[in-house]
């Protein structure tokens, strides 16, 4: 089939690509959210006006219920019902220019819609994977910055059921709040070799896999570089995250901007496609450092840029465990 005759043909393909991409991403994001039990929430949301958005909330009161002496008229110290705020931040994403040469299709009489469908599929896959990478990057950094109250040190051995249980115990009587675990395939293999898992595949999209064991607990398995770190030796260590519902939220800012253009003056007329958009990220129990605007991936993965707001670590979104 020849290149579409309708003019301008690039407008047609632009709409086809964007429509396919949004449908693929929305469908697989919904499956992802369901199968992580809401530990990671990926969605589209309203655009932030500016670099960040602050949200106010009432702080939890300690000592609201007290003993009362019915024989006394002594004064009682007041406690203040205070408000505080957290901030989520906007960050920018985009693609490099992608060359789409018309002649490659017309020469073999192929419909360019085939190439557009393949590009949309790859963009949806890599967008979801990048969102997961960004979420893990921020969570590891925020928890590591807090320290031992949110980080279990299991580096003396490989992952085990006992190790994960000890990590969950950082939340004490709320240890059952963990909705899912996020880990590298090496950690998942260690658990399998220990005979701890009889996993069932729940979801797979590109290099992101979600499985569940016989207890129904989801394990998000992906070989993200953010789940691997090095120590002196040198030796390789691995992070595992246990997430409560709503631990991290990433919203697409609804400002996706695609562009097709053509260039001449060369042996063949060249065509390109490029896109850009923004996302918002929010961590449960933390606020973004608003002195840092338009953050890069490295800044989102800097622990000091996430300020712990939760009074109790039990109100944070994740526990972090480190293993061999």
Image: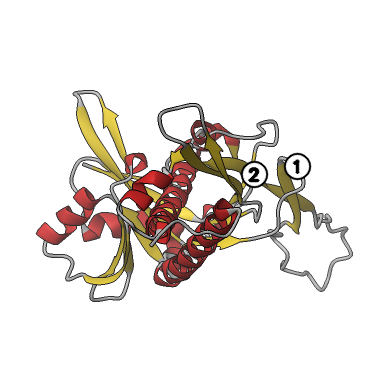
Q: Residue at x 70, y 31 (%)?
A: 291
Horizontal side of residue 174 vs 241, given as left or right: right
Horizontal side of residue 158 vs 308, given as left or right: left
**Badge number at residue 90:** 2
Q: Residue at x 59, y 34 (%)?
A: 295
Work out whether residue 136 or residue 203 is closer to the camera in this orientation and state it. Answer: 203
Regarding residue 169, the answer to whether it shows in the image is: no
Q: Residue at x 43, y 52 (%)?
A: 123
Q: Residue at x 75, y 59 (%)?
A: 58
Horizontal side of residue 252 vs 142, given as left or right: right
Instruction: Identify the secondary structure beneath mark 2.
Output: strand
Labels 1 & 2 near each other (Cβ < 8 A): yes
Regarding residue 10, the answer to whether it shows in the image is: yes
**Badge number at residue 50:** 1
Work out whether residue 39 or residue 117 is closer to the camera in this orientation and state it. Answer: 117
* Coordinates of residue 27 in the picture (x, y in percent): 46, 70
* Coordinates of residue 12 in the picture (x, y in percent): 56, 59
Q: Residues within 10 Å of mark 2 (few under 14, many from 20)?
A: many
Quarter of the image for residue 66 reads bottom right
Work out whether residue 75 or residue 249 is closer to the camera in this orientation and state it. Answer: 249
**Badge number at residue 227:** none
Pointer 1 or 2: first along the chain: 1
Give how far apart the Cα atoms at labels 1 and 2 are. 8 Å
* Coordinates of residue 260 in the picture (x, y in percent): 56, 45
Across the whole image, how many numbered discs are drawn on residues? 2
In the picture, the quarter occupied by the N terminus is: bottom left
Horizontal side of residue 165 vs 262, given as left or right: left
Work out whether residue 72 or residue 124 is closer to the camera in this orientation and state it. Answer: 124
Q: Residues within 10 Å of mark 1 (few under 14, many from 20)?
A: few
In the picture, the quarter occupied by the C terminus is: top left
Instruction: Identify the secondary structure beneath mark 1.
Output: loop
């Amino acid at each position: 089939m020849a290149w579409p005759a309708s003019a301008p043909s690039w407008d047609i393909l632009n709409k086809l690509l964007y429509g396919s991409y949004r449908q693929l991403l929305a469908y697989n994001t919904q499956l992802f959210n369901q199968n992580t039990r809401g530990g990671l929430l990926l969605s589209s949301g309203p655009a932030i006006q500016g670099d960040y958005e602050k949200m106010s909330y009432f702080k939890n009161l300690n000592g609201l219920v007290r003993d009362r002496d019915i024989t006394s008229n002594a004064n009682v110290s007041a406690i203040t019902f205070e408000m505080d705020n957290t901030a989520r931040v906007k960050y920018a994403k985009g693609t490099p220019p992608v060359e789409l040469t018309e002649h490659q299709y017309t020469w073999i009489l192929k419909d360019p819609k085939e190439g557009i469908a393949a590009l949309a599929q790859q963009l949806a896959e890599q967008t979801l994977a990048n969102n997961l990478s960004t979420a893990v990057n921020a969570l590891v950094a925020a928890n590591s910055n807090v320290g031992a109250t949110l980080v279990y040190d299991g580096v003396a051995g490989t992952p085990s059921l006992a190790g994960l249980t000890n990590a969950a115990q950082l939340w004490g009587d709320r240890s059952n709040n963990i909705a899912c675990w996020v880990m590298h395939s090496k950690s998942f293999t260690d658990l399998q070799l220990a005979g701890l898992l009889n996993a069932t595949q729940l979801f797979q999209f590109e290099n992101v896999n979600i499985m569940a064991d016989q207890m129904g607990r989801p394990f998000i398995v992906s070989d993200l570089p953010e789940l691997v770190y090095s120590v002196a030796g040198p030796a390789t260590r691995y992070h595992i995250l246990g997430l409560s519902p709503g631990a991290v939220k990433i919203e697409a800012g609804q400002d996706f901007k695609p562009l097709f253009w053509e260039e001449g003056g060369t042996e063949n007329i060249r065509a390109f496609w490029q896109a850009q958009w923004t996302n918002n990220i929010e961590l449960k129990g933390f606020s973004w450092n608003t002195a840092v605007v338009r953050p890069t991936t490295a800044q989102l993965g800097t622990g000091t840029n996430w300020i712990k707001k939760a009074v109790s670590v039990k109100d944070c979104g994740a526990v972090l465990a480190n293993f061999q």
